[in-house]
Image (cartoon, rainbow, N blue to C red):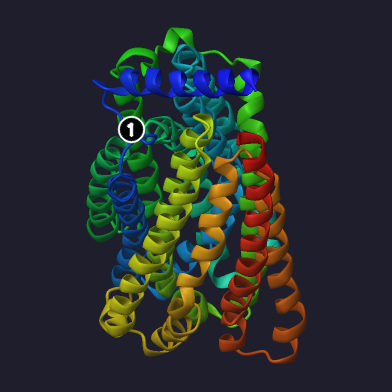
C-alpha cells in the first residue's frame, strides 16, 4: 500500500515538475487544462499545412492540365501512388520520432530530448539519401509493372526521376516537423510549407507557361520547393530554445532513441508502404481504362486528399496528445483525447465533403475542361469522395494506439483491411464487373471493414494498457 502511494506521489511530482518546466517555453501544454481548444489549436495549423501541401501538389496537375495536355497531366498523376510507395516507408519513421520525443516531454525527461532530436535529424538525412537512390533505380520497372500507357511512359519516368532527387529534403522536412509537433508547435511547419508552396506555384507557372517545360517544369518546381521547405525547418530547429536546439556538429545516432523510433515508426512505415502498394494495384487498374481515366481520377483525387488532410490532422493530434499524457501516466486524459479527436475529425471532414460535393463541377473545371476526363472525375467524387469521413474511425483509433506505444496492431489491421481487402476486391469483383464505378467502390467498402476492426482492437489494447497505469 505504501509502495503504491509512493508511486502515485512520484507521478504527481513528475507531472507538476513537467508543468512548471513547460511554462515559459514556446510549447503547448498537453497534459493540463481543457483539451478541446488545445486539440483544435494543434490540429488546425496541421490541417492548413496538409491542405496547402495538397493545393500545391494540385497546382502541378492544374498547370499541366490547363496549359499542356491530358497526356502530361496523366504522366504527373500516374506517379502519385509510386511516389507514396517510395516515400511512405521512411515518413512512417517520423511518427516514431514524434512519439519518442512526446513521451519524453510527458514523462518530464527533458534532459534526454537533445540527443533524441539529433538522432531524428541524422536518421532523416540517411533515409532521404536511401529513398533517392532506390527511387531512381526502381522508377522504370515500377511504372512498367503498373502498366503505365506507352503514350505517357517517357514523361512519367522523367517526372518520377527528377522528383526522387528531392528525397533528403522531403525527409528532413517531415522528421523536423515531427520534432516541432511533438512539443505542440504546428505553426512553424505551416510557415515553412506556405512559403515553399508559393515558390512552387510561381515556378510551375514560369517553367510551364513561359518556358514550355511541361512535365520537367513541374518536377523541377517541386524539387526546389522541397529544398526551401527543408531549409526553413532546419533554420527553425537551429534557433529553437534549450534542448530542442539543433547543432549540425552534434548530429549522431543514439541507439536507444533509434530503437524507439523503429519500434513505433517501422510498423507505421510498413503500413504506409503496403498501403501504397495496394494503391499501385488500383492505379494499374485505373490505367486499364486509358489516359482520360487516369487524368480524371487524378483531378478528383486532389479533393479526396484534402478530405484526408482533415482526418489526418486530428489523427496526428491524437498521436501527440496521447503520447504526452501516456508518458505522464494520465489514462483518463488519453480517453478524452480519443473522444474529442474522433468527434472533431468526423465533424470537420463532413463539412469539407459537403462543400466539394456542392461545388464539384466548378472545382473540376480548375483542372480540365475535357468532357471525358470530367466524366471519370465525377464518378470518383460521388463514390469514395462522398464517404471519405469513414476513414476517421480507423485513423484516429490507430493514432491513439500509436500514442500508447502500440504501433504494430494498427499497422497489421491497416495492411489487412485497406490493402489485402482492396487487392481482393480488384482481383475478384472488378475482374467480374469491369467498370470504373465498381473499382471506386473498393474504397468505402474497405473503410467500413477496417474501421470496425480497428475500433475493436483499440478498445482491447486500451483495456490492457490502462490496467498497467492504474
Q: Is residue 216 left or right of residue 195?
A: right
Question: Residue pushed farthest front?
Answer: 1
Q: Is residue 458 left or right of residue 236?
A: right
Circle 1 sits in a helix, a strand or a loop, which is it?
A: loop
The residue nearer to you, when weighing 86 against 381, is 381
User: Residue 282 is drawn in which quadrant?
Assistant: bottom right
Query: Is the residue 22 above or below the residue 378 in the image?
Result: above
Pointer 1: what residue? 29
Q: Mark 1: few, some, or many residues within 10 Å (few <14, many ≥20)? A: many
- Residue 249 position in % (x across, y down): 44, 7
Q: Is residue 215 something that shows in the picture?
A: no
Q: Residue at x 47, y 18 (%)?
A: 113
Q: Residue at x 47, y 31 (%)?
A: 102
For the C terminus, which image quadrant?
top right
The residue nearer to you, when weighing 144 against 330, is 330
Q: Is residue 362 something that shows in the picture?
A: yes
The residue nearer to you, when weighing 239 against 143, is 239
Q: Residue at x 34, y 40 (%)?
A: 224
- Residue 316 position in % (x across, y down): 45, 47
Query: Is the residue 97 above or below the residue 287 in the image?
Result: above
User: Residue 68 is drawn in which quadrant?
Assistant: bottom left
For the N terminus, which image quadrant?
top right
- Residue 332 position in % (x across, y down): 49, 44
Q: Residue at x 33, y 53 (%)?
A: 47
Amino acid at each position: 500500500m505504501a509502495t503504491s502511494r509512493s508511486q502515485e506521489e512520484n507521478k504527481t511530482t513528475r507531472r507538476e515538475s513537467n508543468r512548471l518546466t513547460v511554462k515559459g517555453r514556446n510549447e503547448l501544454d498537453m497534459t493540463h487544462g481543457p483539451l478541446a481548444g488545445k486539440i483544435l489549436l494543434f490540429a488546425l495549423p496541421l490541417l492548413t499545412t496538409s491542405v496547402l501541401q495538397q493545393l500545391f501538389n494540385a497546382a502541378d496537375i492544374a498547370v499541366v492540365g490547363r496549359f499542356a495536355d491530358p497526356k502530361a497531366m496523366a504522366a504527373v498523376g500516374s506517379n502519385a501512388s509510386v511516389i507514396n510507395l517510395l516515400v511512405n516507408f521512411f515518413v512512417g519513421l517520423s511518427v516514431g520520432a514524434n512519439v519518442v520525443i512526446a513521451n519524453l516531454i510527458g514523462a518530464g525527461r527533458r534532459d534526454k530530448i537533445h540527443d533524441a532530436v539529433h538522432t531524428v535529424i541524422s536518421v532523416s538525412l540517411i533515409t532521404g539519401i536511401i529513398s533517392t537512390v532506390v527511387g531512381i533505380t526502381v522508377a522504370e520497372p515500377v511504372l512498367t509493372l503498373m502498366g503505365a500507357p506507352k503514350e505517357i511512359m517517357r514523361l512519367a519516368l522523367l517526372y518520377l526521376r527528377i522528383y526522387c532527387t528531392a528525397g533528403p529534403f522531403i525527409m528532413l522536412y517531415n522528421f523536423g516537423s515531427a520534432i516541432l509537433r511533438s512539443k505542440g508547435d504546428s505553426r512553424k511547419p505551416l510557415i515553412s510549407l506556405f512559403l515553399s508552396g508559393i515558390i512552387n506555384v510561381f515556378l510551375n507557372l514560369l517553367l510551364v507557361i513561359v518556358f514550355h517545360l511541361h512535365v520537367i517544369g513541374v518536377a523541377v518546381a517541386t524539387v526546389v520547393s522541397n529544398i526551401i521547405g527543408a531549409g526553413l525547418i532546419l533554420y527553425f530547429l537551429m534557433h529553437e530554445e534549450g534542448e530542442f536546439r539543433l547543432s549540425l556538429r552534434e548530429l549522431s545516432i543514439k541507439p536507444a532513441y533509434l530503437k524507439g523510433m523503429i519500434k513505433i515508426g517501422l510498423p507505421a512505415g510498413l503500413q504506409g508502404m503496403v498501403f501504397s502498394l495496394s494503391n499501385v494495384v488500383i492505379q494499374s487498374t485505373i490505367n486499364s481504362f486509358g489516359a482520360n481515366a487516369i487524368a480524371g481520377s487524378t483531378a478528383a483525387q486532389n479533393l479526396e486528399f484534402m478530405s484526408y488532410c482533415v482526418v489526418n490532422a486530428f489523427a496526428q493530434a491524437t498521436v501527440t496528445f496521447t503520447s504526452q499524457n501516456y508518458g505522464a501516466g494520465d489514462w483518463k486524459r488519453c480517453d478524452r483525447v480519443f473522444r474529442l479527436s474522433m468527434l472533431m475529425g468526423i465533424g470537420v471532414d463532413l463539412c469539407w465533403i459537403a462543400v466539394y460535393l456542392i461545388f464539384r463541377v466548378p472545382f473540376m473545371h480548375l483542372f480540365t475542361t475535357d468532357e471525358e476526363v470530367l466524366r471519370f472525375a465525377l464518378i470518383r467524387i460521388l463514390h469514395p469522395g462522398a464517404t471519405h469521413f469513414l476513414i476517421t474511425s480507423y485513423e484516429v483509433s490507430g493514432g491513439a494506439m500509436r500514442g500508447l506505444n502500440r504501433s504494430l496492431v494498427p499497422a497489421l489491421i491497416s495492411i489487412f483491411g485497406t490493402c489485402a481487402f482492396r487487392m481482393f476486391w480488384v482481383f475478384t469483383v472488378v475482374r467480374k464487373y469491369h467498370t470504373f464505378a465498381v473499382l471506386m467502390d473498393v474504397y468505402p467498402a474497405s473503410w467500413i471493414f477496417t474501421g470496425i476492426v480497428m475500433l475493436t482492437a483499440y478498445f482491447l489494447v486500451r483495456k490492457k494498457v490502462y490496467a498497467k497505469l492504474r
